[in-house]
Amino acid sequence: MLDYIIVGSGLAGIAFSEIALQNNKSIIVINDDSQNSSKIAGGLYNPVILKRFSEVWQASSQLELMSEFYSRLESKLGVKLDYKLPLLRKFHSVEEQNNWFTASDKPNLSKFLSTKLITSKINAIDSPFNFGEVLHSGYLDTALLLDAYKEFLKSNDLLLNETFDYSLLDREEDFITYKNLKTKNIVFAEGFGMLSNPFFSKLPLDGTKGELLLIKAPQLNLEIIVKSAVFIIPVGNDLYKVGATYNWEDKTNIPTEAAKNELVSQLKELIQCDFEIIEHYAGVRPTVKDRRPLVGTHPMFANIHVLNGLGTRGVMLAPAMATSLFNLIENNVPLDPMIDIKRIKNFVSSFYQKQ
């Protein structure tokens, strides 16, 4: 009998799979590649919400766990994933400068916001009001991680590349069967695909479509991340990721001309050099209106679990949220109420009404 079936192999599914394996648990991952938000993500991580100069929720603990987690994955998979790069926030006014310095005086932000203005010229980017530097930032090569981890799973016969059929899941008192598999627990880490899951479709997942560009700009010559209306992330060989848009209505993975034009317009306002669009990506992020993940155990079925809603900060959140869920299942350690699906007061009642 397996310890876990894990449905989904985006950032959330990989994080839970790896933590289970590190704890000597047996797993099978089922994935059909229908959700691509992790693969096309910018992969940017930083501990500060730069629009409001406020700390990301539990940033310090997430960063610490994240750094160790991805370092172990790099060693295991033999690939470079985590690129720790400075992030410069372009200021647009003296008021923004003042807000930055006010924020940097706060105890919870002082370790993340440098108090020294970056006044030097940044290649092809004019900034009369200079830049502020965010510390402990960088990006994760999410596409490489997903591909490399999928190969690891395949080579160890731990992957079923197919669409999960909920109608074939049967529950017994102490285990679950799915086709010819028997498992103690099943974890659904399906991203936006959760809306088709009869066990968790009533949870308030509100997907947000994001689009980004991969550009080539030989004259830009950046080795740092720059954030203004868009972010620019250097990924090597004169290539840069540029993003991202937010669309709360369109729930498809199809790139749009409108989003491309929006990104190009914002990019032209930021950089003064030529560039070529190499790729245009789109995906639906699994976001939640209260901006907290959806983690926990089904209220009726003790061996059916969910790990979802990581939104735009999946790189930072995935290791911490997967660890929390694993500790809940294996060690009965209560979840933080901020992430526990029990906070969704109408979830249980709506599920019972559905029955």
Image (cartoon, grey):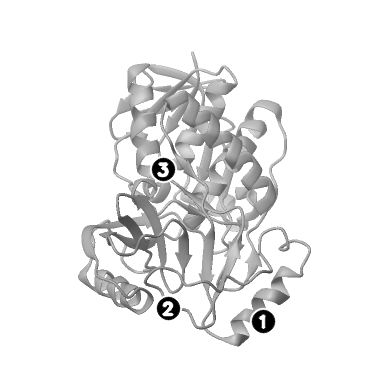
Viewer can see residue 205: yes
Give the vertical position of 285 relative to 70 (above or below): below
Amino acid type at image mark 1? Asn
CA separation in Å, label 2 and label 1: 20 Å
What residue does disc 2 label?
126
Amino acid type at image mark 2? Asp
Secondary element type, mark 1: helix
Tag of residue 190: 3
Residue 88 x/y as whole percent: 52, 65
Residue closer to the observer: 154 or 116:
116
Secondary element type, mark 3: loop
Give the vertical position of 140 relative to 304 (above or below): below
Q: Residue at x 66, y 64 (%)?
A: 113
Q: Residue furthest top?
A: 1
> Mark 1 or mark 3, which is nearer the start of the sequence?
1
Q: Quadrant of residue 49?
A: bottom right
Tag of residue 98: 1
Tag of residue 197: none
> Mark 1 or mark 2, which is nearer the start of the sequence?
1
Secondary element type, mark 2: loop
Q: Quadrant of residue 155?
A: top left
